[in-house]
Structures are given as structure tokens and as C-alpha cells.
Image (tube, rainbow, N blue to C red):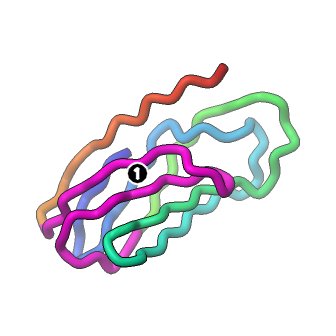
């Protein structure tokens, strides 16, 4: 996941986001509560019994400077959590390693 700051917003690229192979429309929304940012990635359909990788791009914000806990949710369930100290010059990559059994 790449996060770049632009005019008080985050430009997020989630590279190789895993969803089923026929997801319909993929969406991402973000909301803030204090210093917690919840990002919700969803697929419209989940009929297929296989997984494929997709690249998603979206904006989150506006975001004020500070230390945040970011919670990435997939289909309503927490998928990954990390902290970030946000300033207007943020340009970072977060590596998410998940194993599916």
C-alpha cells in the first residue's frame, strides 16, 4: 500500500489487493474518528470460489497532521492495522503480508 500526501489528502494505491475473481465493482471508502482512520475495501459480488489480485487507487481525507492508527477493512472485517505519523510530506509504502490457508 502506497500513501502519498497531496493538499491534506492521502492518495492511496493498494497494489495486489486480493478479492474474488469476479468481484463486480470494487469500492473503497475512508472515515476518521479522532486519530483513527478506517478504510473499507469492498467487492460488489462474491460468487466465485477463487482469488485474484487487483490494484486499487483512492483518496482519503482531508487529514490533519498527527499520529494515526489506520485500520484496513475488507468486506467489513479488519484485515490489517498500522500506525503512521502523518505530515504534509508523507510518501511511504506499507507492506502487507497475509497468508490465506
| Magenta range | 60-88
Horizontally, residue 83 falls left or right of residue 14, namely left
Q: Residue furthest front?
A: 34
Q: Judging from the image, what secondary structure is the residue with disc 1 in?
A: strand
Q: Residue at x 60, y 37 (%)?
A: 18
Q: How many marks?
A: 1
The residue identified by callout 1 is 13
Reply above or below: 101 against 12. Answer: above
- Residue 33 lies within the magenta run: no
Question: Magenta segment, principal secondary structure?
Answer: strand
Quarter in which the N terminus is drawn: top left
Q: Position of residue 57 (x, y in %)?
A: 46, 56
Reply above or below: 100 against 6. Answer: above
Quarter in which the C terminus is drawn: top right
Q: Residue at x 30, y 54 (%)?
A: 3
The residue lying toward the viewer, choosing from 25 and 8, is 8
Amino acid at each position: 500500500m502506497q500513501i502519498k500526501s497531496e493538499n491534506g489528502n492521502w492518495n492511496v494505491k493498494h497494489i495486489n489487493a486480493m478479492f474474488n475473481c469476479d468481484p463486480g465493482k470494487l469500492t473503497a471508502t475512508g472515515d476518521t474518528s479522532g486519530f483513527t482512520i478506517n478504510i473499507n475495501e469492498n467487492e460488489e459480488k462474491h460468487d466465485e470460489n477463487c482469488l485474484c489480485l487487483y490494484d486499487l487507487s483512492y483518496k482519503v481525507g482531508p487529514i490533519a497532521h498527527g499520529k494515526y492508527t489506520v485500520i484496513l477493512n475488507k468486506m467489513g472485517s479488519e484485515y490489517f492495522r498500522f500506525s503512521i505519523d502523518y505530515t504534509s510530506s508523507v510518501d511511504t509504502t506499507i507492506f502487507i503480508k497475509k497468508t490465506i490457508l
